[in-house]
Image (tube, grey):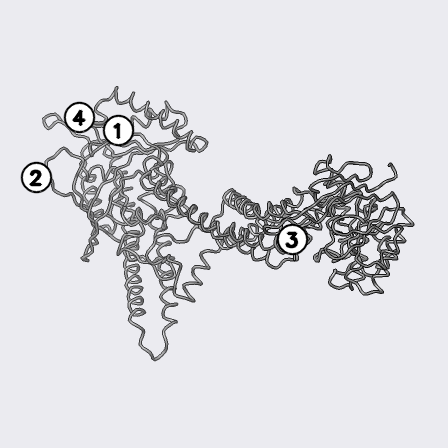
Amino acid sequence: MADVAIQVDRLYKSYQLGRVDLHVLRGVTFHVAAGEFAAVVGASGSGKSTMLHLAGLLDRPDRGQIRLLGQDAASLSSGARNRMRCRDIGFVFQFYHLLPELNVLQNVLLPARVDAPSMGWLSRRRAVKKRAREILDRLGLDDRLMHRPTELSGGERQRVALARAMINRPKILLADEPTGNLDSKAGKGILDLLRELNRRSGQTTLMVTHDLSLAEQADRILHLSDGRIV
Amino acid sequence: MYKLFLCLRYLRSRLIAYFAVLGVAVCVFMVLVSVSVMNGFLHKIEQAAKGLFGDIVIESAGLTGLGYYDEFTRQVARQVPEVEAASPFIITFGLLRVPATDYRQAVQIAGIRLPERAGVTDFEDGLHFQEGLSEPTFDPPVALLQDRLRAEAEHTERIRRSEMQQLKPGKAPSALRAKRLNRLETARLFQLQAAEILRQAADYQDRMRRLQARLDAARLQAGGQDSKTVDELLIELEKLTEQAAIQPPEYRIILGLGISGLSFRTEAGQTVRYIVPGHKVVLSLVPLGQRLSMTDISPNTATFTVVDDCRTDVSSIDSEIVYLPFETLQRLNNMSAEYDADDPKVQIAPARCGQIHIKVAPEHAQDKSLEAVCRKVEAAWQEFHRRRPQAAGGDVSVQTWRQRQAKIIAPIEQQRTLVAIMFGIISTVAVVLIFVIFYMIVMQKTRDIGVMKAIGASAGGVAGIFLAYGAAVGLIGSILGCVGGYFFVRNINPIRDAMERWFGFGGGFTKEFLLFEKLPNEVKPLTALIIMAGAVLAGVLGAVIPAVKAAKMQAVEALRYE
């Protein structure tokens, strides 16, 4: 099991909508091996994003177990969960979620700033900036460093979000409909990047999408339907 | 580090934060200006009280007074090493008149010893015609008075000319301007008249000096024997003294600057004097110092030559008190020593004063230390009184100047506190403003908060961003308010003048009626620091609820927020 990066076991999650309990996940079980590129496909509302948020420690399940990199998520303190989100998990969201006040470079550096202890940032700043420039260079954004998110195209924004997810060299990359808001060309570009990053750096990648043609690029496809992996 | 980074980013990029900064700045400005001005008024009143009483006041209850005061002042200086100087003082009531006019005014009459008093209080600082003299006196050189009076006349003339320049040619002056010009003309004539009296006085003084020299020589020649020459010269000198344009030194007076009708203030706050050195005034007072019944009270009256005027900057003192030589007032108030009618060598009662004012060394003149010295002086008095029971008939109080003036100072202190509280309450507006603005910012930033949490920021870290943001808004606002308030207070007088010039409104402070030459314009660094600290605290307080809300936000919900 040491080679399993994400282990999800009988996961349940429901939300209350007024007086109605909405059971989104009903015993989801799957695993993603270390270095694997897995895609979860399912119709809209099938619980894909909920499952990804739980796997990324952004939310807590009602029942079931999540093990990330061999650690039981339930046993982690909230500080340890924060640290894990910061260092071991990178997120890419459908709507990019870049901070509008920051330029491209500052957005990419943000997780490294969060990770640094109060005074530690000053000593590691130079090295981290160099790494951020390298990543952005690799993603074709070297001439956009000082631009604000509003000055970028959708594809460029998503590449910045991807660079932000990569800055702390996470072992796991979680992508929630990363191409959902892009045209097909830009979408393909992002997917190619995800694929390449997965191959070159051996990151475990879990992507959720409703588009089967995109999911087919993954090593393995998991189908989520009615709150279960089928 | 990311907290500070994001806080500064938000501060720079959110226009609405500038409104919060502005709100804090306005509140800090208001509180600083009001507290500084009130502090200034209080300081002036305190200085005036100190100037009038010295550091410690010994006072007898009722009108019986304190006897053997010189003996006691010598003793207290020996017994209490902190005591630097002491001087007797009398205060009573009387009627002031200006001869050849129908002017009369009720006044308080203070009997003081000069220059001894300068060692006890800062009396000399308020003198106008003896300004700069280290030892004030009731007998200043006539030449000096002439010089200063010349300057005074020039000052009056300058004001008159500037008023004349404003007249429009070919047009009759307004009734108000005509009245002002009339007053200035009268003052000019009065001052010219005084200058002439001083000129004559200088002349007489010269003749009297020569006569005195001849008298001294004749006395020396007579060798203590009766001499016709000496007698003749004496009579001549007395005659000259009578004719002299100014009264002898024991009949000189210093007026409080502000006694109604003796001077006036222009709209621009310049003082113009009618009665100046050289003029004579008449004082009548009921002698209150003697044991007498109501039926046999008859007033004592004497004529005095004005030698100066004095200002403490506090209207209640300056508009009411005139100062006479101590021994003269003692005599007029029937407080001199009483002797047996049958045997004039037997003293029945000692000469008395109303109060003894004591000056304490500056290092012991602060509140607690001064109270300790005050207790020592009280002990010294009790011991003295045991030895000399005749020194006082009734109760004697020994108080610090603050205790003595508590009735005046305490209400002003309370007013200052009240103003600070009122403005403090108004300043809660700043807290509410920051709260509302931050709440808005937190709502706008919901998704960003989700992102921050997704990349590992803790709840405390997210709260820290907004608390630091609030503190920064408070700090920047308070620095701006403080700098603005400082410059406003420092320039409050020119600002007041400009307001009056432009709008005819001087912020409720009309120089013509109040005796403060200027509004207080000092800012105490400690006051500014406390107000700034309060503003930063207000900023943090206003940000607390939004910060807690941001910290409690669930990352998933925040990311989904539209």
Amino acid on which the number 1 mark rests in the picture = Val
Residue B499 versus residue B411 in the image, above or below: below
Q: Earlier in the sequence, mark 1 or mark 2?
A: 2
Q: Earlier in the sequence, mark 1 or mark 3?
A: 1
Q: Residue A220: horizontal and vertical position, in percent?
A: 87, 50
Residue A171 versus residue B195 in the image, above or below: above
Q: Residue A190: horizontal and vertical position, in percent?
A: 84, 58
- The kind of secondary structure element at disc 3 is helix
Find residue A153 and report its image quarter: bottom right
Q: Which is more toward the observer, B138 or B510?
A: B510
Q: Nearer the viewer, mark 4 or mark 3?
A: 3
Q: Residue B191: horizontal and vertical position, in percent?
A: 30, 59
Q: Earlier in the sequence, mark 4 or mark 1?
A: 4
Q: Where does label 3 land, which residue?
A: B446
Residue A144 versus residue B77 in the image, above or below: below
Residue A130 visible to the viewer: no
Q: Nearer the viewer, mark 4 or mark 2?
A: 2
Furthest toward the right, the residue is A200
Is B131 situated left or right of A136 in this image?
left
Q: Nearer the viewer, mark 1 or mark 2?
A: 1
Q: Quadrant of the N terminus of chain B?
A: top right
Amino acid on which the number 3 mark rests in the picture = Thr
Q: Which mark is residue B295?
A: 2
Q: Which mark is residue B254?
A: none
Is B429 situated left or right of B72 in this image?
right
Q: Where does label 1 land, which residue?
A: B396
Q: Earlier in the sequence, mark 3 or mark 2?
A: 2
Q: Which is more toward the observer, B3 or A216?
A: A216
Report the chain holding disc 4: B
The answer to whether tags 1 and 3 share a subunit is: yes
- The kind of secondary structure element at disc 4 is strand
